[in-house]
Amino acid sequence: MNKKITDLGLIKGKTLLFGGVYSNLQALEALKAIAEKENIPAENCICTGDIVGYCAQPEETVQLFKIWKAKSILGNVEIQLAESAEDCGCDFTEGSRCDGFSKLWYPFAQSKLSKNSIEYLATLPDHISFTYANKKVTVVHGDYFNVSEFVFKSTDWELKSKNFETTESDVIIAGHCGLPFNQEKENKLWLNPGVIGMPANDGSPQVWYAILDDTSGSLEFSHYNLDYNHKLTNKLMQNGLLPEEYARTIITGIWDNTEILPAIESGLQGFGITL
């Protein structure tokens, strides 16, 4: 498996984790402000991929990400854009609503990105690894083996376990599925900080991120909600080119459909998330 892995070495201090910016410039601006307020340096800010996606400002979002100098791995969207592919590579079921929506937002994003932005996205690694509070940490998008694998809390631990074994990691930081969660088992931690570009199907327009903290000498983490100017994001998405359903989700916090979700996560739609 020919992968580009960036090892950041030893990281100390608060570390900001997030994913799925999805071309949501307003959410990225709000998160960057949080990092500055918390005195978290850019090198301690790590994204699980999909900087580009469903929202209206892909070019502006990539350029702000570059200016910020936060770290990121490749999401499936970045891989497809860098390869000039015709679809987002999300592995949606052909003919599904998500598949239909991707035929709108992906070409839109592709058409708006500059050559400079595409070249920047192509430089991102497949994975990031680092040591934190004596734990080896690996950052993946879907999972280590498949960038488009949807891994949820209800996903069989056996699948997660293979990721720890192959990477020889104590902690896996993952993205892609759009829902924040954490699961600890066998002295291993699978941590999905959630995404900032879209709500988590919990009935709130707020989005999710996480922070690692080593103040106590051990690895601790917390999930957080992020408030941002979601009304502006919604307004910008109503341009006649992007899915109206995704624009509505920005406001309602409810996904248009739960096609990708296992039964357990699907049944929690609109009930809020407690972490």
Image (spheres, rainbow, N blue to C red):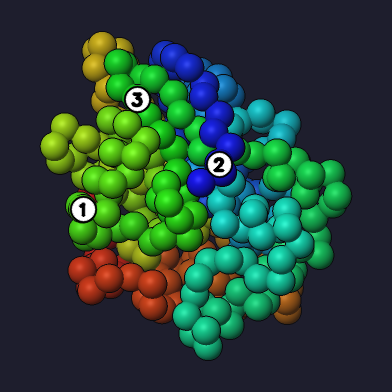
Question: For the residue carrying disc 2, how many other residues have a C-alpha within 10 Å: few (<14), some (14-19), or many (20+)?
Answer: few
Question: Callout 3: helix, strand or loop?
Answer: strand
Q: Earlier in the sequence, mark 1 or mark 3?
A: 3
Question: For the residue carrying disc 3, how many other residues have a C-alpha within 10 Å: few (<14), some (14-19), or many (20+)?
Answer: some
The quarter of the image holding the C terminus is top left
Q: Give the farthest residue toward the front.
A: 1
Q: Position of residue 157 (x, y in %)?
A: 20, 52
Q: CA distance from mark 1 to mark 3?
A: 20 Å
User: As displayed, is residue 125 above or below residue 129?
Assistant: below
Q: In the visual, does 170 lie left or right of 258?
A: left
Q: CA distance from mark 2 to mark 3?
A: 18 Å
Residue 47 appears in the picture as rendered: no
Q: CA distance from mark 2 to mark 1?
A: 23 Å
- Residue type at the position of mark 3: Lys
User: As displayed, is residue 116 above or below residue 202?
Assistant: above
Q: Give the farthest residue toward the bottom.
A: 95
- Residue type at the position of mark 1: Glu
How many marks overall? 3
Question: Callout 2: helix, strand or loop?
Answer: loop
Residue 76: image tag: none
Question: Callout 1: helix, strand or loop?
Answer: helix
Give the residue at mark 1.
158
Q: Earlier in the sequence, mark 2 or mark 3?
A: 2
Give the residue at mark 3.
136
Q: Position of residue 127 (x, y in %)?
A: 51, 38
Q: Position of residue 84 (x, y in %)?
A: 76, 62
Question: For the residue carrying disc 1, how many other residues have a C-alpha within 10 Å: few (<14), some (14-19), or many (20+)?
Answer: few
Q: In the visual, does 268 lie left or right of 252?
A: left
- Residue type at the position of mark 2: Lys
Give the residue at mark 2.
3
Residue at 13% over, 37% down: 186
